[in-house]
Image: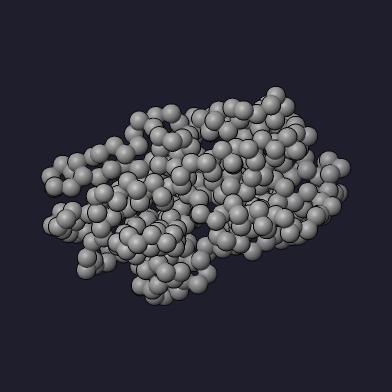
Amino acid sequence: MAAMQRVWDIFCRVIDNYGDIGVCWRLARQLAGEHGIAVRLWVDEPASLQALCPALDCAQASQTVDGIEVHHWTEQSTFESVGDVVIEAFACELPASYVQAMAAATPKPHWINLEYLSAENWVEGCHAMASPHPTLALTKHFFFPGFTASTGGLLRERDLLARRAAAQQTQASSPALQISMFCYDTAPLGELLDQMAATPTPIVCHVPPGKPLAAAQAHLGGSGPWQINQLRVEPIPFLSQDDYDRLLWRCDINFVRGEDSFLRAQWAGRPFVWQIYEQKEAAHLDKLEAFLQRYTADFREKPGKAVPAMFRAWNTGKNVATAWDDFLAARAEIGEQTGRWTQKLAEQPDLATRLVKFCSPKV
């Protein structure tokens, strides 16, 4: 553990269910656990964090969980001090009183705007860019997570791949293909389930509550579980982050969405299908293509065609049945190529380490 022992404040507004707070919670835990930093996490919807961290008590305005000070961030929140480093997650806009306190502090805290993960090329040019405050003696820096050495890197705990390898080595074999299903309600889930049921491959599809289960119920009726030919659709409870990681490690194919589960599926090293968060004017599809270009750059022909086709089908609702059949047929090769992709990413420093290094000379 490093001996930094500084105070970092992380501010998070919950926008996309669990994605924003999921990233912030993993970052907070890693900064505290691996870098010896005192972290205060300010979140406006503690209930979303509680789903990922059941030990959290939503009735408490402030508490310490897993070594993190967690505060319910409201309009009435007051701040006795400012952190040495202040992370404004995903441009959530800090309270005006807090910004004034930052300007009055000596020395000035290091102010970071942690951005969303993107594989687009422009990210490299904007990473670490300074943005002076228009009226106060403060400078904010943009910190972009990314897949290259010229970005802020990716969240990855120091022992993550070792824990994954140990879990997968002791994993019991299953006669059925195990699939985890985490998606938005816009995913063409019904068509996919119909196609899964039409193939002779035994499949168990694990569906968590919320939008994925609601979509399954709308298509299949009732509350499940459902058995259609060789397909079993199994509702599962909402999982903590650690338990969700273990689900991804043991499943053969993972359907994920947003940012946090998307990245964790890559660390699982198994074939996955990503549903990206939808944006106006289909801007998300550019981000999808940027990732596909990096991810499949070294793929052989068969998986190099099957993966982009399935990702596009899942995000547009077009040709899902054909894309799924091809994806399933190429599963072994996709798994092999994804394992190499994971190892390639793991050769780079992780996001928390890069953040600490970026801020260290300045706090």
Above or below for 73 versus 169: below
Position above or below: 89 against 76: above
Left or right: 52, with 163 as reference point: left
**Where does residue 234 sit, x and y in percent of width and height?**
73, 58
Q: How is the protein colored in the picture? A: one colour
Relative to 131, say whether 245 is above or below: below
Give residue 269's position: percent from left, percent from top.
Answer: 64, 45
Q: Residue at x 87, y 42 (%)?
A: 200
Camera-nearest residue between 319 and 256: 256
Viewer-closest of 141 and 149: 149
Answer yes or no: is residue 41 visible: no
Residue 3 shown left or right of residue 235 in the figure: left
Which residue is rendered at x = 38% and y = 55% of the image? 13
The residue that appears at 75% across and 38% down in the rendered structure is 332
Q: Residue at x 70, y 24 (%)?
A: 301
Determine the image quadrant of residue 80: bottom left
Total label count? 0
Q: Quadrant of the C terminus?
A: bottom left
- In which quarter of the view is residue 101 placed? bottom left
User: In the image, is residue 287 above or below residue 169?
Assistant: above
Q: Quadrant of the N terminus?
A: bottom left
Q: Nearer the viewer, residue 110 or 57?
A: 110
Query: Quadrant of residue 14 in the image?
Result: bottom left
Percent across and percent down for residue 243 are: 61, 62
Q: Position of residue 347 (x, y in %)?
A: 52, 41
| Residue 245 in view | yes
